Image (cartoon, helix red, strand yellow):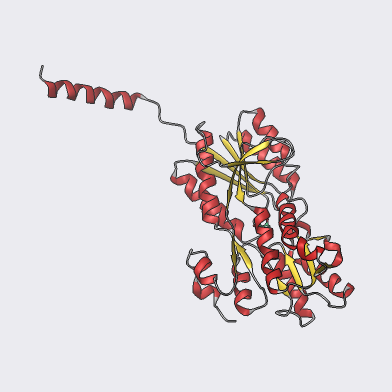
Amino acid sequence: MNRTFIILCVACFAVLWGCAEPPAKKIKIGLSMDSLRVERWQKDRDIFKAEAEKLGAEVIVQSADGDERRQNAQAENMLTQGVDVLVVIPKDSVAAAQIVQAAHAEGIKVIAYDRLIRESEPDLYISFDNEQVGYLQAEYLLRQKPKGNYFLLGGAPTDNNAQLLRKGQLRALQGAIDAGDIRLVAEGKHWAVNWEARDALKKTEQVLTQTNNRIDAVVASNDGTAGGVIQALQGQNLAGKVLVSGQDAELSACQRIVKGTQTMSVYKPIHLIATKAAQAAVALAKGEQIAEVTQTVNNGKVDVPSILLTPIQVDKANLDEVVIKDGFHSREAVYQTE
Ligand code: BGC
């Protein structure tokens, strides 16, 4: 028997052995979303799905349309459908603890996507540094207006991110508050229910009335609510005169930045969080470790293994460089004149 013959036999055997193995079961991922109302979430969904499918997995997506009870029921349903891993963007950071418990009872791992799930033991938290987002919002406005009346308009109080943003905003402003340069109007206590632009509009109108229009800056926590704030300012001929922050670099916000009615936004590259989360979901389903975990974040119960990505301040000067160059929006769309 010559060497070539032996090698050939071994190779044939290996091929046949390979064929005899049952085909690998396709990994099934459940993506449970709070809602799709804010522009970014459609990108999150599409990029997440495309990446997971590229890795050979199947994705079931459910959106709860802003209803935490519906979200819990949808998550239970996905568990019944036999998902191998659950990825959750919680409507309510506390109510979603139930989802983690239900999944773990069946040995299914859970990733908290963009928003932390509290009082439970999620297997991974992947987000941007949200406290830093808040810091960047307020820090930018403070540089433009170091003295004056500031209105802090938070996001949905049920969203852990809204709390982290507020923490970062106050960190940026505290020195100026203590020095008496910045005064928080409406006691800084306003939150926009469900992150709704309509509620932001209403609350800004109330604060404008209460203060006799004496507001110099509104620290709006995202672009959706910034839209409501700016509408209220327009009603008083104050749009472009009062500083307004935002977050997400939504198309309409970028257009407002060009126009000068919104001062800045915070860009968070969605393609990064969505692809990394999809890769992590597939890895967890296979029982693998997530190499990229660099830190932990305490959620009131445990230190959750976390990946926190870096947010970027954007204004008129760097919109092209940051948002358009990254392919987030086209130049034509951003600079479109009505
Ligand atoms: C996200 C923001 C988003 C907001 C409203 C937050 O948790 O981090 O990007 O604008 O929810 O959907």
Outermost residue on the right side: it is 210
Quadrant containing the N terminus is top left
Which residue is found at the position 66% from the left and 54% from the top?
130
Query: Going by the image, does 202 lie left or right of 268?
Result: right
For the point 72% across and 38% down, which residue is it?
A: 97
Tell me the quarter of the picture where residue 166 sits. Answer: bottom right
**In the rendering, at what x and y percent does residue 140 appear?**
66, 68
Image side of residue 148 versus residue 59, left or right: right
Query: x%, y% of residue 252?
Result: 62, 71
* Residue 116: % across, % down: 68, 45
Against 244, residue 79 (above or below) is above
In the image shown, does 237 or 332 lie closer to the viewer?
237
Q: Residue at x 44, y 43 (%)?
A: 55
Report the front residue among 316 and 168. Answer: 168
In the drawing, does residue 256 fall left or right of residue 203?
Answer: left
61 over 16 or under it: above or below: below
Quadrant containing ligand 1 reads: bottom right
Residue 306 in the image, given as x and y percentages of width and height: 60, 42
Q: Single out the residue that lies furthest toward the top.
A: 1
Can you see residue 37?
no
| Image quadrant in which you'd find residue 315 | bottom right
**For this view, does 282 lie left or right of residue 78?**
left
Q: Residue furthest front?
A: 179
Q: Is residue 289 above or below residue 177?
A: above
Instruction: Answer whether residue 108 is visible to the viewer in this image.
Output: yes
**How many numbered discs, if any?**
0
Tell me the quarter of the image containing the C terminus: bottom right
**Between 4 and 295, the one nearer to me in the picture:** 295
Height in image: 126 above or below 181? Answer: above
Work out whether residue 268 or residue 48 is closer to the camera in this orientation and state it: 268
